[in-house]
Amino acid sequence: MSIIKRKKQRKLASQNELANTTWPMIHCDPQGTKTSPNEGPTQEDASTILAQLDSDVILMLSTPNAIYVQEAENYVKAFHPETLELLATSPNLDATFPFFAGGTLDDKGYLWFTANDRVARLSPDLSEVVWSESFEPSGQAYNTCCFLPDGNFLVTTSIAAHIISSERTNGTFKVISSLDLYSIMWNEEHVYPFYPIMPRPVSDEEGGLYFTSDGFMSKLLYDQETQTILPDPVWAVPHQERDTSFNLSDAVVVSNRVYAAAKPQDNNAMQIYSVDRTSGEVEGTCIPFPEAIGSVSAHCVGAVPDKNMLIVICETSDLTGGMAAVNTTTMEVLWHSPIAQIGGAFCCSSVSNRGYIISRDSEDGMLKYWAINLDDGSQTVLHQYPSDVDPSVSLASIGYDGKLYYPNPSPGFAMIQDINNTNN
């Protein structure tokens, strides 16, 4: 294992050198699957480099030429994908998480983040920032930004959804329309009661937006002609137990269904709902971790669509939690890979057939990076080292040439790859 500190950044060759790929975004894709089309590591004791930073990593976005890291305070940084040398640092965006959030790349390589009450578009070399107009009301936490089918940009906050033009006009990006989420009703109930941070919506190719909120999983429609989100829900599914919540993780779209996790009550375990994305009918439910009473994870549901498989995680202090797989049609639990004290986020590689998670063992104090075989849940420890700090809910990224980039609590992040890839 190598550990590097931040070096003096070298000048980038050109603005378009860094980002030239279209898929990287928070949770990997608009459907929220958390599954990458890139290859990841599979070997025990894989080659690992650790990069140390000044503040916590919130999320990372991978391109062939750079790894973009959003720190908790004010900055986005670009690192060399092999050496982890610091390539560039953005101007000060004067925002801290959760008012500094989002994270996605467009097809021209520009990075988009929310910062306080505006959207910031960063050039691929991070030297230029173009701001949107301010949206009202301001001062709310932001947990999402993503592109819509017509190229406009969606920002959701704890109380509103804003449509932002991605085409610059007079030096800025215009706010096209806004929707007060609190005003949306279903059977005389507020679908989106105020919550400090609401999971981001996921979308389908037809403009459907799927939200999870305190009591409902729901579908809204984006109208491309009027460039607005229609205020009347297509459907809203209330949780069966009204004193619990869907406000746990973003939904996941696979084929004609949408899935979401419901928080457990004190004497129950986390439950996964399967809903027909056209009608809103509940097609099935399952409890992947029946013995993990009252336990949850922040980013707990993903999917590997090619395998008709949901991937679910649950944080526990014992082996009742970990990672599990669920059949997307039957809602049958396929396997359970028990790991204690995991971090609250994960990602998968459809190419390597692996899910990736981090944990810290309280008995030996070892921070461990795991690769879980998606066929049977068998485990491989990619790397481990002593740590006094538990893993966070920060989001990892699968890069190119078999590299996995994973936040660690140092603060900083790790680059992990199989030994036979180190000379590629």
Image (spheres, grey):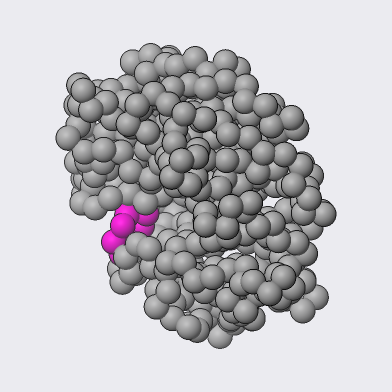
| On-image quarter of the N terminus | top left
Residue 95, above or below 409: below
Q: State the residue in front, 165 or 186.
A: 186
Q: Quadrant of residue 391?
A: top left
Task: Please report the residue visible at 75 percent of the width from the left and 32 percent of the height from the top.
Answer: 329
Residue 222, above or below 334: below
Q: Is residue 200 magenta?
A: no
- Residue 215, image x and y in percent? 58, 60
- Horizontally, residue 248 falls left or right of residue 30, namely left
Task: Please report the residue visible at 57 percent of the width from the left and 45 percent of the height from the top.
Answer: 261
- Residue 123, image x and y in percent? 46, 62
Task: Please report the residue visible at 29 percent of the width from the left and 47 percent of the height from the top.
Answer: 86
Let me know if residue 134 appears in the view: yes
Q: State the residue in front, 420 or 146.
A: 146
Q: Main secondary structure of the magenta part?
A: strand
What segment carries the magenta color? 67-76
